[in-house]
Image: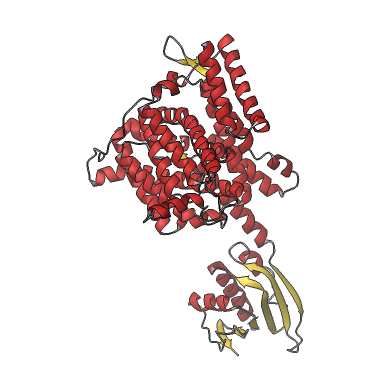
Amino acid sequence: MARFTTISDFARAFRKEDTSGTQTALTFGQSRIEILSGLTVALALVPEAIAFAFVAGVDPLVGLYAAFIVGLITAVFGGRPGMISGATGALAVVMVSLVANHGVQYLFATVVLMGTLQVLAGIFKLGKFIRMVPHPVMLGFVNGLAIVIFLAQMEQFKVTGSDGHNTWMTGTTLYITLGLVAATMAIIWATPKVTKLVPAPLAAIGLVAAAVILFDIPVPRVGDLASVKGGLPQFAIPSVPFNLETLLIIFPYAIILAAIGLIESLLTLNLVGEITRQRGGASKECLAQGSANIVTGFFGGMGGCAMIGQSMINVNSGGRTRLSGIAAAIFLLIFILFASGIIEMIPLAALVGVMFMVVIGTFAWQSIRLMRRIPLSDALVILLVTGVTVAHDLATAVVVGVITSALVYAWNAAAQIQARPHASKTEKGALVYDIHGPLFFGSATHFQEMFDPEHDPDTVILDFQQSRVVDQSALQAIEAVADNYAKAGKTLKLRHLSKDCYRLLRSAGQLMVETNDDPSYRLAVDYDIKLGRIGGH
């Protein structure tokens, strides 16, 4: 985690982008852009935090406090300047049953434990495993998340009836709302063509809100969701019994929440990094997210992680340094403490229009064109991850995508194993099999079927110069082939085994291995196998 010992260290964090080698000078003009970007993000955070608090079954201020605390800490210490974090729907849906069955205090305790697990992930640098997520999974992730963001906005087209139930808008209210949404999107599209002094989303929200307030247009507003007025978050230790029973209740939830939070945060980190041309920061992001959630749990927040929608709003509005994220968090606190009346007058249609533009910008439209040009397996992974993200949750989708991609890779790699026979040039009457392709669990069975001990000559050489022995299944396959040749009374030699393959053979413990291999220069040696014994020459 970053440590600032002086004010100048703190200032340098704003002037430089982390780990990328590029710099963004925090001039007066850039500072203005960063602050206005933060204001835009804060406005978009309010309805999202309230909505996700309702999903989790907690008070709206619990979601707003989480957005403020998580957003502030990750903005200062996170792995990617420009990223925005807060309460998210992916976490909220997991919290529902915990709050319903045990109460909000157990949620706070779970968030603290969730943050602790995320800090441990950062300490042990587990964030680096995000590199193993294939590009088709990333495409499916952004497409699925774009669809999820779009579907989440549909809730804003519902109104509460006299019976207390939500129903779809109809008639004039629906048409006016749709018109305001379209107007917001049009302003966002047109503003950059006119001026770049103000972020386009902020200009759109301001103009549409001014029109609605000035003409008293009857459409739903932020205040119709809930009041955003509140005080400063107060420190409190979660009021739960400190015993094993409590741990057994909260630990499964904490594991799931920590995993979902880190996966969404690290994928968002990669996505923002592609846009801003930054690299690294995965472990740092784990530490920041974990620390933020620990603090949030002690200050009455529902926890959170990176938010791709708000991050895209920030980046597209010009936010490139930590100042934009800090500004967003501070503006959010100002809304809660002093400006709730003004914020509650903003029409939801304006915020929906902003999120619709985020959906358009987030969805990987090029993936549709790529479907015809990429391997069928990659196309299926994109569709699978997209579908699971929409139908279930992000963490499950990514895990399913990675496993599917790994199985496809293993299947394709297994098909590459070949044994090409030819007469030996050094040993008269010997038959040489040139082995090509990796020998591992996926190709082990096919490897054993490629040889004919009954009809091969008395001396057979397996040349592994173009192959690699990978795992225990490969060792078992070699042993099985050796046994078959031994039973036929024939000699089997292994040639050009690499140093690591030799180490695997020795660690198997089932075959006696002797060698005069030179460990410094990795000189190749031949191994003779006869009657289950390997001897070095």
Q: Position of residue 167 (x, y in %)?
A: 50, 15
Q: Is residue 300 shown to the viewer in this render?
A: yes
Q: Between 38 and 474, which is closer to the camera in this rendering?
A: 38
Quadrant (top left, top right, bottom left, bottom right) of the N terminus: bottom left
Q: Please tell me how many numbered marks the rendered image carries.
A: 0
Q: Is residue 251 shown to the viewer in this render?
A: no
| Colour setting | secondary structure
The part of the image, by quadrant, that contains residue 360 is: top right
Q: Is residue 436 left or right of residue 10?
A: right
Q: Residue at x 60, y 49 (%)?
A: 274
Q: Position of residue 330 (x, y in %)?
A: 41, 36
Q: Residue at x 60, y 33 (%)?
A: 359
From this view, report whether residue 184 is shown above or below residue 106: above
From this view, report whether residue 203 is shown above or below residue 453: above
Q: Between 436 and 368, which is closer to the camera in this rendering?
A: 368
Quadrant (top left, top right, bottom left, bottom right) of the C terminus: bottom right
Q: Between 459 and 114, which is closer to the camera in this rendering?
A: 114
Q: Position of residue 90 (x, y in %)?
A: 47, 37
Q: Between 486 and 311, which is closer to the camera in this rendering?
A: 311
Q: Residue at x 43, y 47 (%)?
A: 76
